[in-house]
């Protein structure tokens, strides 16, 4: 299983680079993961989304999709793409240390 | 005392549930009422064939009421909302129907208006959907006039009904234009918000290969933010564009509007949070959900509603008898994937098992995850099974509700002589 080191702590990742164990994540790791995803500075708006993803995951066992984020996070889909240009749900899930949003079947 | 079971929706799930319950429960034990907004039951798997002239629209529609067994009441009326607190459904004509058990079987709703530009300029002229009967008929006319250019098949976002249908549409379009001798004048492009052709990794390889073999381009991770019908462009939220001369689009889906008007019943998309094994709604113990209306992590497909039927009907009887529910639904899904030229693939999977190769339903049977003539015949035979076995709420002989493991090749193992699929 691949690993990465954030803030001096080694964490396990899955093949797509998502946290294998979301319990290993801490807020302090977020800026370092973000910079690997091409986001150099996490603003309050980024944090609003990241915390929302984390809360949703803890409540439902899965991170929300972009469409659900747009309806419930208080950030429009348009702005979500400005914040996370490479795909809001996937990128924010990575930074929030949760699995890839289930999308659909 | 006679209990009243109200079933909202007279589609696949609602009809088969009402029919199963009517057989299981005496008339003095339970009154069964089905509510729907109209009396037109559309055979939805047939919509895919209409644009290519392979099915006639009038063949696909029958009376909802006539699919129900004697002893089931049918109300032709829209639902205003469900009052969970008082166990009652308020209908649009003001009638209040109280219930002991409610079954939500109202499926998914198409919501084109949630995408900017839909339905707008060019709608039903060069922008279509085959997910409605009208749309499929209009698209048939447009395709018959189409003599070259770019045809884009685009999925706006998941979840959608029958997630393989847009791929099947692309395969059939390739066949259709070859048959007309103009395939070299048509560019086919498949646009999806997913990171591959399909959601399941094992089929993804097979299906992506088929797109490539048929010369269909694949555009992935394209989240359509706007459809510009006037200039013929799909524009993604991240600013990419795909130009088209003709677009066959799958609009966004959600639950029915009355779910949004019923406090506590649905989630943010209007689907009903449901226990994925017992099919009981999370909102209240006397509410059950079947088919596309549920938020369970299974495909939105008729086969799922069919396989759910046995668990659902048995759990409603258990609930009425005060017994514990049976958590037996395993997410079993079974889809024929029409691939053109008289062939089809078959996939069979559940919550825990990816679609595998092998045969269905046992060691001798239809080939899985492989194109064959036999599967195409299976898909055609399915229409008869739908009206005569599925809707009456019977099991298909030899096909169990839970996913059969016999006949499937475990991942990584291949039959001797079988070439790797990628």
Image (spheres, coloured by chain):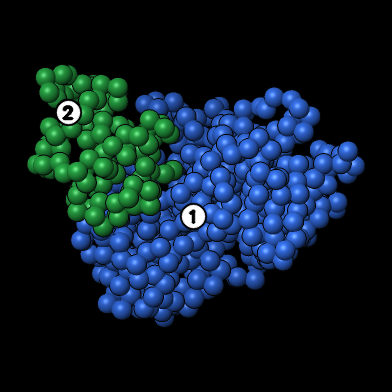
Q: Do marks 2 and 1 both belong to one polypeptide chain?
A: no
Residue visible at 53% across and 66% down? Answer: B132
* A60 lies above or below B42: above
Left or right position of B160 against A75? right
Residue visible at 21% across and 21% down? Answer: A11
Categorize mark 2 by other alpha carbons within 10 Å: few (<14), some (14-19), many (20+).
Answer: some
Residue receiving disc 2: A29
Q: In this structure image, what is the colour of chain B? A: blue
* Front residue of A44 and B325: A44
Left or right position of B43 against A50? right
> Which numbered circle lies on residue B254?
1
Q: Position of residue B379 (x, y in %)?
A: 57, 52
Callout 2: helix, strand or loop? helix
Q: Position of residue B344 (x, y in %)?
A: 49, 51
**Quadrant of the drawing holding the N terminus of chain B:** top right
* B24 lies above or below B207: above
* B348 lies above or below B31: above
Residue visible at 83% across and 39% down? Answer: B25
* Front residue of B109 and B20: B109
Q: Quadrant of residue A23?
A: top left
Residue at mark 2: chain = A
Disc 2 to disc 1, how far (Cα)? 36 Å
Q: Quadrant of residue B65?
A: bottom right
> Which numbered circle lies on residue A23?
none
Callout 1: helix, strand or loop? strand
């Amino acid at each position: 299983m691949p690993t990465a080191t954030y803030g001096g702590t080694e964490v396990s990742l899955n093949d797509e680079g998502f946290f294998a164990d979301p319990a290993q994540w801490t807020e302090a790791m977020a800026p370092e993961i973000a910079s690997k995803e091409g986001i150099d500075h996490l603003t309050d708006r980024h944090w609003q989304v990241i915390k929302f993803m984390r809360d949703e995951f803890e409540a439902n066992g899965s991170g929300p999709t972009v469409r659900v984020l747009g309806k419930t996070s208080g950030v429009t889909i348009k702005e979500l793409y400005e914040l996370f240009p490479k795909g809001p749900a996937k990128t924010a899930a990575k930074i929030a240390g949760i699995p890839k949003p289930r999308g659909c079947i | 005392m006679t209990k009243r079971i109200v079933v909202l929706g007279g589609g696949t799930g609602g009809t088969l549930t009402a029919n199963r319950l009517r057989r299981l429960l005496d008339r003095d034990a339970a009154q069964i009422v089905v509510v729907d907004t109209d009396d037109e039951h559309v055979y939805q798997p047939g919509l895919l064939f209409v644009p290519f002239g392979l099915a006639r629209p009038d063949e696909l529609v029958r009376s909802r009421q006539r699919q129900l067994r004697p002893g089931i009441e049918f109300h032709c009326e829209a639902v205003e909302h469900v009052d969970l607190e008082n166990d009652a459904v308020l209908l649009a004509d003001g009638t209040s129907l109280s219930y002991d058990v409610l079954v939500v079987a109202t499926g998914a709703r198409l919501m084109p208006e949630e995408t900017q530009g839909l339905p707008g300029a060019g709608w039903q002229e060069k922008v279509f959907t085959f997910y409605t009967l009208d749309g499929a008929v209009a698209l048939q006319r447009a395709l018959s006039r189409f003599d070259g250019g770019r045809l884009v098949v685009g999925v706006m976002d998941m979840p959608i009904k029958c997630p393989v249908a847009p791929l099947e549409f692309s395969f059939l379009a390739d066949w259709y234009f070859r048959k007309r001798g103009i395939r070299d004048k048509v560019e086919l492009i498949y646009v999806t918000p997913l990171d591959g052709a399909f959601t399941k990794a094992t089929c993804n390889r097979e299906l992506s290969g088929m797109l490539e073999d048929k010369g269909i381009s694949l555009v992935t991770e394209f989240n359509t933010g706007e459809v510009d019908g006037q200039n013929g462009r799909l524009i993604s939220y991240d600013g990419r564009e795909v130009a088209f001369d003709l677009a066959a689009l799958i609009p966004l889906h959600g639950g029915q509007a009355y779910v949004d008007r019923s406090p506590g019943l649905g989630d943010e998309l209007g689907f009903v949070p449901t226990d994925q094994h017992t099919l009981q709604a999370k909102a209240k113990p006397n509410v059950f959900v079947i088919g596309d209306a549920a938020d369970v992590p299974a495909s939105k497909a008729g086969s799922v509603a069919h396989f759910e039927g046995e668990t659902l009907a048995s759990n409603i009887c258990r609930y009425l008898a005060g017994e514990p529910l049976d958590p037996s639904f395993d997410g079993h899904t079974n889809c024929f994937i029409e691939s053109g030229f008289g062939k089809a693939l078959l996939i069979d999977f559940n919550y825990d098992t990816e679609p595998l190769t092998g045969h269905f339903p046992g060691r001798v049977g239809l080939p899985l995850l492989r194109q064959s003539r036999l599967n195409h015949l299976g898909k055609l035979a399915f229409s008869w099974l739908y009206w005569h076995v599925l809707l009456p709420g019977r099991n298909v002989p030899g096909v169990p509700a839970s996913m059969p493991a016999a006949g499937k090749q475990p991942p990584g193992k291949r039959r001797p002589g079988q070439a790797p699929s990628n």
